[in-house]
Amino acid sequence: MRPLIVANVEQLESEMFLVAILYGADGLCADKIIVKFDGYGDAFERLKKLGGDDFELYTADKQLFKGALEVAGIAVSIKRPSDVDDTRREIELIADLLREVHEIEPVIKEERPKPSKLRGFLVKKLEKILMKLRGDYDYEI
């Protein structure tokens, strides 16, 4: 049986990482790598080091899938992101450590201002008017 690698290119803040998990014949994690993404050519070299010359690759990344089709010894399958979300979980587990090691600045999200009390009051009144106008009927809009 061929070794199985689940790999994706995951984003953490502004940086991209190659996350690859090698599963053994028993279905348990045998090894994994999380490295800065330096292009698809480098990614295939790292995957070859991890899985050997002949392995199966599951990915949700279209570019990784496309490139793996051209590499001998890789039997690649494209999967839904939910099927290969192991890579996302792995990067989230050590996100703080990756931010510290690679000196990644956190992205600051702008907070939306709260609507004024007058606006909230008007929205509630308009919703009540709409409910009375619609009555007990269901209208499709």
Image (tube, rainbow, N blue to C red):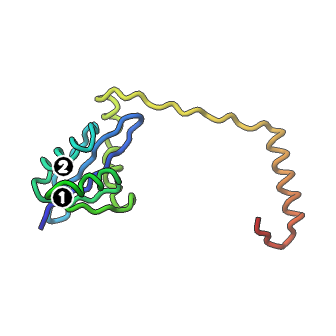
Locate residue 6 relative to residue 129 in the image: left or right.
Answer: left
Q: Nearer the viewer, residue 85 or 17?
A: 17
Mark 1 Cα-neighbour bin, 10 Å: few <14, some 14–19, many ≥20: many
The quadrant the N terminus occupies is bottom left
Which residue shows up at 47% across the image and 32% down it?
Answer: 107
- Can you tell which quarter of the image residue 78 is in? bottom left
User: Which residue sits furthest left?
Assistant: 53
Which residue is label 1 attached to? 74
**Residue type at numbered disc 1:** Ile
Pair 2/1: label in front: 1
Please say whether residue 46 is visible from this viewpoint. yes
Q: Are marks 2 and 1 in contact (CB under 8 Å)?
A: yes
Residue 102 in percent (x, y) is at: 30, 29
Residue 44 in percent (x, y) is at: 20, 47
Q: Nearer the viewer, residue 5 or 69?
A: 69
Relative height, residue 27 to residue 97 (above, below): below
Which residue is label 2 attached to? 47
Q: Nearer the viewer, residue 68 or 81?
A: 68
Relative height, residue 4 to residue 135 (above, below): above
